[in-house]
Amino acid sequence: MLVVMLSAPFKGLSKKELALLEAELRFTSMRLWVSGVACICPHLNTEGFPDDPRENYLMGYEEIARRCDAVLAAWGANSVGVQRELCAARQRFLSLEALMQWLDAINERNKQEVRDGC
């Protein structure tokens, strides 16, 4: 099973923006899980945690990004945390559409290998 991390800015968002972002992340996460892709979402994973030790969170999510098959940057790559996670990622995507196309290509390749007896 492929594993994708949803990366998004955390600091500098209004309460309304944060609520919209979290709703979008929940929807995207659900869509990935339903598609057969495991998903980790830092926003939802550490929701309500204290700000300190922020650097521990950032380092931890960089490590998780390295271990994932891909990272999707929701709401762009305009934050330090998102940039760090994208730099650590094996595959980087800035849109859900691009990520889904990549996943579809992998699924097709896997199906072809099964048909070919690999």
Image (tube, helix red, strand yellow):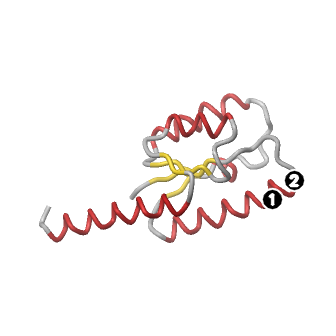
Q: Mark 2: few, some, or many residues within 10 Å (few <14, many ≥20)?
A: few
Answer with left or right where residue 24 lies relative to residue 48.
left
Residue drawn at point x = 66 percent, y = 63 percent: 26
Q: Looking at the image, do the residues carrying marks 1 and 2 touch, with CB atoms under 8 Å apart?
A: yes
**Farthest right residue in view:** 15
Q: Mark 1: few, some, or many residues within 10 Å (few <14, many ≥20)?
A: few
**Farthest left residue in view:** 117
Q: Please, what secondary structure does the residue beneath circle 1 have?
A: helix
Quadrant of image for the C terminus: bottom left
Residue drawn at point x = 30 percent, y = 67 percent: 108
Mark 2 highlights which residue? 15
Query: Can you give x and y, in whole percent of width and height, for residue 22 in the image?
Result: 73, 58
Figure quadrant of residue 101: bottom left
Q: Please, what secondary structure does the residue beneath circle 2 have?
A: helix
| Position of 17 relative to 107 (above/below) | above
How far, Cα to Cα, is label 1 from label 2?
A: 6 Å
Answer with left or right where residue 89 lies relative to residue 46.
left
Figure quadrant of residue 16: bottom right
Query: Can you give x and y, in whole percent of width and height, for residue 63 in the image?
Result: 52, 35
| Position of 104 relative to 84 (above/below) | below
Query: Can you give x and y, in whole percent of width and height, for residue 57 in the image?
Result: 66, 35
Mark 1 highlights which residue? 19
Residue drawn at point x = 47 percent, y = 69 percent: 35
